[in-house]
């Protein structure tokens, strides 16, 4: 590599003999990502990096057409090119993505008019209506249970785990999360619970088995519902847990408790009012509940590439946007917790298992799919590590609910101790 011949205003240098157009395109890319400590190189051409800074990774662009697309629309073009092996990252992929996210102004990318317009069009095309939700959910969750068994825990819990210690296994952390949710809800034997978006059924079965409640769990993923029903039968819990293959909008009460873990992201901002109506219809003014969801500290659409290739219709709300689901019905927000580091740790486990199963993934779906999902997992881990993504848990209660926690002590006790100590008192006591 020769000596630098161009130094940009933000102290980025371009090296090598390159045509003027190629230099301009490299400038556009670095303008989009900010001063990230990475080296970007066109195979057989120019390279770009921060002077005097050892790059965390080398990003190799295979051809000039890919370079042009990156300059025009970096958000989508990077994902498409990486999946197609037209971009290679030499070094720590997740670390490089984290560095890029942290170099964005205010923690987010500066999108031009084209990106904003394309995002609005995608919001319209992937609307989470009754029909749209079925299509969006099917494209992700009905890929086949055997695929998810390769890299999730033994219960197939596809949401943030809770690590009592950083040394906990993924299986132990997912079980701890299930119990943590139950303790936050202060479940009592004989109560009725409705779960919106139940995945493969782990939480519903845990609630019934360990807390003596009856659960009605809704999901529109056919593959997940069949698996959950099979597990309920194998564990002798079919009389306590009913898995319903139906849209959350068809939930009817009355129930004592409402819980949703990892589904608010798939509701869509324009349907939040409907979601709030469903919750109130389910538990009324005397019930309580919990929302667990990926969120953000600022308003903004989810990555267009993620929505295009991985999670169509996804949206990560701010706390204010999530609270707007509850406020029209006078639900009191009792507790808010951010488990962001726990989700970064969870995905670290998932990514390691996914990489170990790479050959099997290729045999199932091909190399393009493997690379796309590797990028999705690495990018998600980077998002939680950098703080561009958050993981919120909100507990709430109706305006006439007598279930108000006196202290947080039961949340951090062992499961058996929590069952004894988890006594909720009237707000007026």
Image: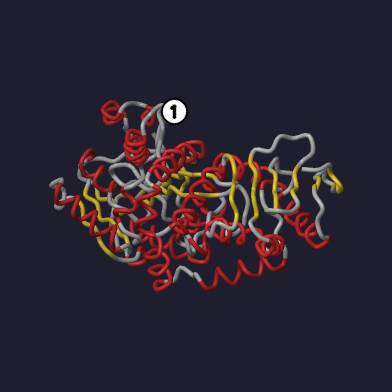
- Crowding at mark 1 (Cα within 10 Å: few <14, some 14-19, many 20+): few
Which structural element holds mark 1? loop
- Residue 176 percent across, percent down from the top left: 34, 34
- Residue 247 percent across, percent down from the top left: 34, 66
Quadrant where the N terminus lies? top right
Q: Nearer the viewer, residue 53 or 276?
A: 53
Image point (44%, 54%), residue name:
370
Residue 61 lies in quadrant: bottom right
Residue 100 lies in quadrant: top right
Q: Compared with residue 48, is residue 81 higher up or lower down, i.e. above or below?
A: below
Quadrant where the C terminus lies? top left
Q: Nearer the viewer, residue 357 or 175?
A: 357
Colouring: secondary structure
Q: Compared with residue 301, is residue 37 higher up or lower down, i.e. above or below?
A: above
Residue 355 lies in quadrant: top left
Residue 231 is left or right of residue 358, and the answer is left
Is residue 286 shown to the viewer in this render? no
Image point (65%, 41%), residue name:
99
- The tally of labels here is 1
Residue 104 is left or right of residue 363, and the answer is right
Q: Which residue is mark 1?
A: 166
Is residue 408 shown to the viewer in this render? yes
- Residue 377 percent across, percent down from the top left: 48, 48
- Residue 75 percent across, percent down from the top left: 63, 58
Residue 200 is left or right of residue 190, and the answer is right
């Amino acid at each position: 590599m020769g000596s630098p011949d161009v130094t940009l205003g933000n102290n980025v240098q371009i090296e090598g003999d390159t045509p003027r157009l190629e230099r301009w395109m490299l400038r556009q890319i670095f303008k989009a990502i900010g001063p990230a400590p990475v080296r970007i190189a066109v195979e057989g051409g120019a390279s770009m990096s921060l002077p005097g800074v050892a790059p965390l990774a080398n990003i190799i662009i295979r051809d000039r057409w890919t370079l042009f697309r990156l300059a025009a629309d970096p958000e989508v073009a990077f994902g498409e090119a990486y999946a197609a092996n037209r971009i290679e990252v030499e070094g720590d992929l997740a670390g490089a993505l984290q560095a890029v996210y942290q170099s964005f102004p205010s923690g987010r990318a500066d999108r031009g008019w084209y990106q904003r317009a394309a995002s609005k069009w995608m919001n319209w095309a992937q609307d989470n209506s009754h029909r749209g939700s079925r299509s969006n959910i099917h494209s992700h969750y009905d890929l086949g249970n055997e695929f998810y068994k390769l890299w999730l825990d033994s219960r197939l819990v596809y949401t943030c785990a809770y690590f009592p210690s950083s040394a906990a296994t993924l299986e132990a952390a997912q079980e701890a999360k299930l119990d943590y949710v139950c303790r936050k809800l202060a479940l009592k034997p004989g109560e009725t619970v409705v779960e919106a978006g139940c995945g493969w059924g782990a939480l519903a079965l845990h609630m019934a088995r360990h807390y003596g409640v009856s659960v009605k769990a809704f999901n529109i993923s056919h593959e997940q519902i069949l698996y959950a029903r099979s597990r309920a039968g194998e564990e002798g819990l079919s009389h306590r847990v009913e898995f319903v293959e139906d849209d959350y909008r068809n939930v009817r009460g009355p129930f004592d408790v409402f819980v949703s873990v990892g589904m608010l992201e798939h509701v869509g901002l324009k349907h939040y009012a409907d979601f709030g109506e469903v919750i109130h219809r389910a538990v009324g003014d005397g019930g309580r509940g919990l929302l667990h969801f990926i969120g953000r500290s600022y308003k903004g659409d989810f990555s267009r590439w993620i929505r295009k290739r991985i999670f169509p219709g996804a949206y990560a709300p701010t706390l204010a946007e999530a609270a707007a689901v509850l406020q029209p019905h006078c639900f009191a927000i009792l507790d808010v917790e951010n488990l962001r580091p726990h989700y970064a740790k969870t995905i670290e486990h998932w990514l390691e298992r996914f990489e170990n199963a790479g050959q099997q993934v290729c045999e199932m779906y091909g190399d393009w799919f493997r690379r796309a999902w590797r990028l999705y997992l690495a990018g998600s881990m980077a998002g939680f590590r950098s703080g561009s993504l958050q993981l919120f848990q909100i507990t709430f209660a109706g305006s006439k609910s007598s279930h108000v926690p006196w202290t947080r002590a039961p949340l951090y006790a062992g499961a058996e101790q929590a069952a004894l100590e988890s006594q909720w008192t009237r707000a007026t006591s």
